[in-house]
Amino acid sequence: NAGVTQTPKFQVLKTGQSMTLQCAQDMNHEYMSWYRQDPGMGLRLIHYSVGAGITDQGEVPNGYNVSRSTTEDFPLRLLSAAPSQTSVYFCASSYSSRGRDTEAFFGQGTRLTVV
Amino acid sequence: GDSVTQMEGPVTLSEEAFLTINCTYTATGYPSLFWYVQYPGEGLQLLLKATKADDKGSNKGFEATYRKETTSFHLEKGSVQVSDSAVYFCALTERTSGNTPLVFGKGTRLSVIA
């Protein structure tokens, strides 16, 4: 059982480049989300999805796009990378709260550096 | 909106010392409360949780009690080990209005020295 898988683990981008961070889960979770972790800031929510075809913005969505075409996958796209997007990115998944455990499972993270 | 406030770190303790990491929250409904732990170079993993007032979550010697009257969920351990060195995050999610994203505190780094 793989859980939540993020790729790549490390990435260096030049300012203005675009890329997609991949996230896949094999637990049939409805709920998936992306966070960024910065020193002294904790984890801040970028985007989330409550099911296939449904996405919504979190606290810091600017510069990022998401889509959810399947239950398993929730990719995060950086449209035009900026140094301010240098961070560690975490994907998480969980069941919805409809009578089920809401524990979130996290991927190992993607460390992104924008130069 | 909902928020979580936890004590600033870093916290440095000697092995076998008592640990308390304070966490208070603000929520409009009836949240579920969590403590997550992040070991160096890894993602977050659930340490313990409580879903209603007066529930006590426990795991690996850690405990936290959901106190609605003080809106708190403090993490405690009676005797810490070097292997407990990690960053600890308090978090909540609302259950009353359907599923909501986890809201995290800023994290508290714990270092335990032998």
Image (spheres, coloured by chain):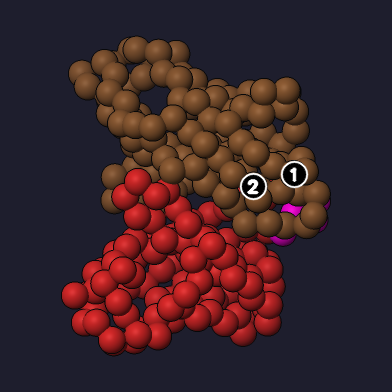
Chain colours: A red, B brown
Residues at discs 1 and 2 in contact (Cβ within 8 Å): yes
Other-residue count near label 2 (Cα within 10 Å), few / some / many at <14 / 14–19 / ≥20: some
The quarter holding residue A51 reads bottom right
Rendering quarter of residue A96? bottom right
Q: Which amino acid does label 2 sit on?
A: Asp
Say if the magenta span includes residue A41: no
Left or right: residue B34 compared with residue B50:
left
**Mark-to-mark CA distance, 1 and 2:** 7 Å
* Subunit under mark 2: B
Dot 1 alpha-carbon crowd within 10 angstroms: few under 14, some 14 to 19, many 20 or more: few
Q: Main secondary structure of the magenta part?
A: loop
* Residue B1 in picture, x, y percent from top left: 65, 50
Residue A26 visible: no
| Residue at mark 1 | B28
Q: Mark 1 lies on which chain?
A: B
Residue B7 rendering spot, x and y as whole percentages? 44, 30
In the image, what residue type sits under mark 1?
Thr
Q: Residue at x 59, y 70 (%)?
A: A57
Q: Which of marks 1 and 2 is nearer the N terminus?
A: 2
User: Mark 2 highlights which residue?
Assistant: B2
Please give the name of the residue rendered at 48% of the width and 33% of the height, measured from the top-left corner.
B6
Q: Give the range drawn in magenta.
A: A96-100
Compared with B93, B13 (above or below) is above
Residue B54 left/right relative to B7: right
